[in-house]
Amino acid sequence: MVLRGGVQFFSQDPRDPDTRNLAYKFDLIGTDGQILHFDGHKIIDSTMAFSARRTWKATTTLYVTITRPDKSRVATGILHIGGGDFLREMQGFGPSGAPGVLQQLASMKRFLLNFTLQTGKYFFFPFQALSNGEVSIRSNSPKVRPSKVVMLTADDGAQTTMHCWSPRLSNPKLPPLLFVPGASVDHQIFALPTIDTNAVEFFLGKGFNVYVVTHRVGRTEIAKSGYTIYDARLDVKAAMEYVRDDSRQPQMYCVAHCAGSVALSMGLLDGTIPAGWIKGLTASQGKRNVFHHCQQCVSGGGGDKDRGI
């Protein structure tokens, strides 16, 4: 017998931002007088897309855990709701204290309309607009904040941002270091707040001036405009121009990742980015990593002294 409890429709799943739960939580008393807690949930996610069968399965499959008051587990299982059960469930809808047929039908209509709209979002999930979630992160060690954040303007007028860090003890013999991240990420991929020493902090400790550009196919509002990775080569060029002017050095080391390495490569290949601006290059795409001496490629020079990073 159910004592007390409640139902939460389409609540946020803490494990996945793109998933919703239909949660059923209540206390019950067994035939032996034992108090138990019933915790059940249905999973509503993108696997339902364009499939009536998977949508029905998701909305009629209940994952159940039954526990004692001390949180010890009694049983786990899966309950499947049949078509007849669903119809009987609908007949039970209605406002308390108003058993009239019209009121019952009105309540059922409101519920089914809302239920259909919510599940419809996941049935047509591929058509939903992408969004960037804001995550609050706690770190055991304080992170080094950028000394400045600058706005870059590319040759085609597109504007992007770049974060800049200056070391406490700068080494004038070291060239500046430019990081180019991949698609759908920003400067934080190299300045992670979740680890004790991230990439930016490591190279700051070595005396490098560090720059991280967030190009137009990264985690930025301008990405909504439909630019390509080829277009992003112009942002990399603008970043390099700024680094050369800001550091007053003609060459730099460059670490490019994923789509950033593709944009940089395109810029080098079509001549948009002069290879002579780069003293050393580390680029990664998938599982392949390449270290290249651009100066050696251009002039036949370079040598082991260029292996600074």
Image: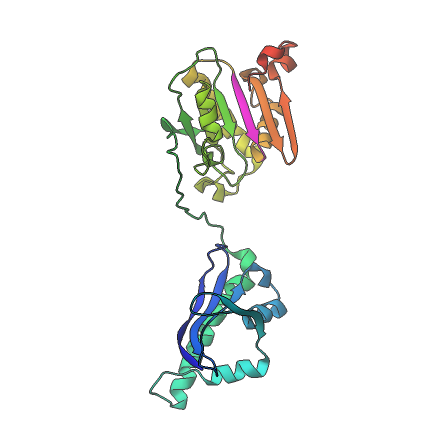
Q: Nearer the viewer, residue 94 or 68?
A: 68
x%, y% of residue 47?
59, 60
Q: Is residue 257 above or below residue 11?
A: above
267 relative position to 172: left or right: right
Please name the residue shown 44% across and 81% down the image: 33
Seen from the viewer's position, the closer of residues 206 and 285 is 206
Farthest residue, direction left: 97
Residue drawn at point x = 49 percent, y = 13 percent: 250
Specify whether residue 154 is in view: no
Q: Residue at left 47%, top 25%?
A: 202
Q: Which of 34 and 207 lies nearest the eye of the viewer?
A: 34
The image shows residue 78 at horizontal and vertical percentages of 58, 71
Q: Predominant secondary structure in magenta?
A: strand
Pick the front one: 60 or 235: 60
212 up-or-down from 46: above or below: above
Q: Is residue 142 toward the left or the right of residue 296 in the image?
A: left
Quadrant in which the C terminus appears = top right
How is the protein colored in the picture? rainbow
Camera sees residue 236: yes
Q: Is residue 3 left or right of residue 180?
A: left
Q: Is residue 104 above or below residue 26?
A: below
Instruction: Reply yes or no: does residue 185 show up in magenta.
Output: no
Residue 256 is a magenta residue: yes
Find residue 299 and report its image quarter: top right
Extent of the magenta region:
252-258
The residue sitting at the bottom extreme is 100
Residue 205 found in image quarter: top left
Hey, which quadrant is residue 229 in on the image?
Answer: top right
Quarter placement of the N terminus: bottom left
The residue located at (41%, 15%) in the rendering is 170
Task: Give the percent coordinates (x, y) of residue 249.
Answer: 46, 13
Question: Residue 220: horizontal and vertical position, in percent?
Answer: 45, 40
